[in-house]
Image (cartoon, rainbow, N blue to C red):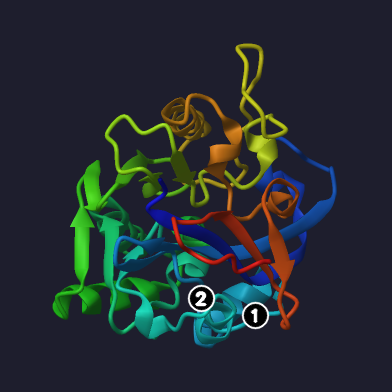
Amino acid sequence: MADYSIWVLEYAAAEDFNKSGILYGAHNQGTKKLPFCYVVIKGRGHTAMVDVGYDNKAYGKQLADKFGLTNWHSPREVLADIGLTPEDVDTVFVSHAHFDHFGNSEDFPNARFYIQEREVSKWVWAMSLPERMRWMMIAVDPNDILRCVQLAKDGRLVCVDGVMMDALPGIDLHPAFDSHTFGSMWIEVRNDGSAQSADRWILAGDLIYDFGNLASDGGAVGVETMYTPVGLGVGSQTNLVLATEAMMKSVAYEARRVIPVHEERLKDAFPSRITRHSLRVTEICLADGEASKVA
């Protein structure tokens, strides 16, 4: 029995992203393609997303250009490739507030947004610092934080304080404080609804960029395997490694169940297809009775 379908949807890409940003310590090792994606979780009467991308205008576009992103398409175009619209989305889990994850909140008028309270409060704090300390804001659009406040004003924001079990049935939220960002979180789907589920999927946000962060080819991770954290973080690499261990432990160290949405090689591990916009749809799993979107 599977309650939810999960798809990773590419909406833009950086064709030449420095490997040192992906793998800590990978200096002078060149570049690789980094897809920019969000996740759709559909089932149990809900259509949810993990993150919403960026809006490709104003300061969001400036940041996208700075990071070399190309082939951007709107959520309406991207979701249409799996038969959905932005209006269908009722829940958004924000893994963190970097522009490429939280910059499109206005495109989802019917969604309730879940974010760690620490992620909101600490970005407000960071915005208050002197200009000489603004490195921390390198991937944040301050307007996204203002839009977050508007969501709260409209009654559509849930500020999470640590772990939240069953945010939707069988979907749990776990914090990774002071890691990639101040209040990053990872999303766990217990896809059979059981508290002791043997069918768990972890949506890692940017706590993991790449299979290389797990030092794994998708199989079991052994005691001799060393994690390599991501290269970009406002917190510490120690906290990134601890978050990686928590995610891996949750899935009994079956690395293929920890999904790094920036990983181009997801196509080698799961069924996928290229859309008419030259973007990839990757199908992680299907709920009972759900038709494939990549067949």
Image spot of residue 215 (x, y percent)? 68, 29
Quadrant placement of the N terminus: top left
Q: In the shown orientation, is residue 158 left or right of residue 148?
A: left
Q: Amino acid at mark 1?
A: Trp
Taking the spot 49% from the left edge, 58% from the top edge, the residue there is 6
- Residue found farthest to the top: 223
Q: Which mark is residue 1?
A: none
Closer to us: 92 or 132: 92
* Res 65 visible: yes
Query: Which amino acid lies under the numbered mark 2 shown in the image of this protein?
Result: Tyr
Give x and y (percent) for residue 290.
Answer: 48, 64
Identity of the residue furthest to the front in this view: 289
292 up-or-down from 244: above or below: below
Query: What residue sits right under mark 1 in the picture?
Result: 72
Q: Secondary structure at mark 2?
A: loop
**Is any part of residue 162 visible from this angle?**
no
Tell me what residue is drawn at x 23 percent, y 54 percent.
117
Percent across and percent down for residue 258 are 54, 40
Alpha carbon of mark 1 to alpha carbon of mark 2: how far? Answer: 9 Å
Q: Residue at x 42, y 31 (%)?
A: 198
Label number found at residue 54: 2
Circle 1/circle 2 CB separation < 8 Å: yes
Element at label 1: loop
Residue 277: quarter of image: bottom right
